[in-house]
Amino acid sequence: MSLAHYGVLFLDELPEFDRNALEVMRGPLEDRKITISRANCTLTYPCNFMFIASMNPCPCGYANDSVNKCTCTPQQISKYVKKISGPLLDRIDLHIEVQPVEYERLQDDAYAEDSKSIKERVNQAKKIQKERYLEYNVLSNSELTQPMIKKFCKLNNDAQSLLKDAFKQYGFSARTYTRILKVARTIADLAKSENIEIEHIAEAIQYRVLDKKISKEN
């Protein structure tokens, strides 16, 4: 984790890692530092990194696949997904489910936004955040403290109502609530919107796929 400081830490096949090792990540993901204690010393290392992970939808990998048949039982799928604990999921901003790409879509000539345009939008959003937080010694929405969230992530009544309904329906935690607000703030910045609107909150909620899956199973 410390070697990934100011970089990216990517874990492939996340549920295959030892659960205890994954649980150790909870504190560093929150505090951006990791402390190792031994008999004769205690060392603290920085670890402010972007955490990215991937996993299959089930042990065989074919759950929800329209072509290949899944051979897993519901119990096996539930056990597999639950290897990733709720507290660890709380510390991950986005959960995205990627569907298999059909052959016809690979041959599709429909327009897709090019990387240069995407880079320009991202850089513009980063510039907005840099200027907004110039007096706060932070560079991005992900670094917002609780007082800053209250100041810069205010919601109108419609957005507040939608988030409240989702909070009750999916059993979101307080930590997930703040994550959604930060992501919605970024979505608004990408749209060059000064305020967080209901559509930004709705999109941020859609990026909590695993939260919603686990809530259904419970």
Image (tube, rainbow, N blue to C red):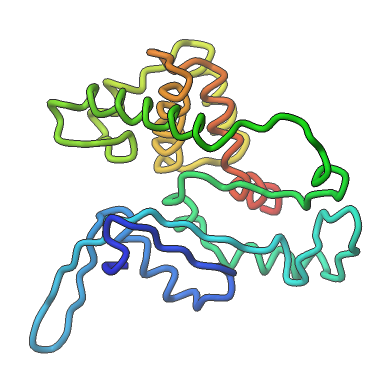
Relative vertical location of residue 7 with respect to residue 181 in this rendering, above or below: below
Image quadrant where one finds the N terminus: bottom left
Which residue shows up at 27% across the image and 20% down it? 151
Is residue 79 shown left or right of residue 205? right
Is residue 180 shown left or right of residue 6? right
Which residue shows up at 86% across the image and 65% down it? 70
Pinpoint residue 33: horizontal percent, then vertical percent.
22, 61
Which residue shows up at 78% across the image and 50% down it? 101
Q: In front: 214, or 50?
A: 50
Q: In front: 131, or 146?
A: 131
Pinpoint residue 164: horizontal percent, then vertical percent.
52, 25
The number of numbered discs placed on residues in the rendered structure image is 0
Query: Which residue in the rendered view is the most extreme toward the left?
Result: 40
Pinpoint residue 215: horizontal percent, then vertical percent.
64, 48
Relative vertical location of residue 116 with respect to residue 5 in this rendering, above or below: above
Q: In front: 74, or 7?
A: 7
Which residue shows up at 80% across the image and 59% down it? 63
The quarter holding residue 207 reads top right
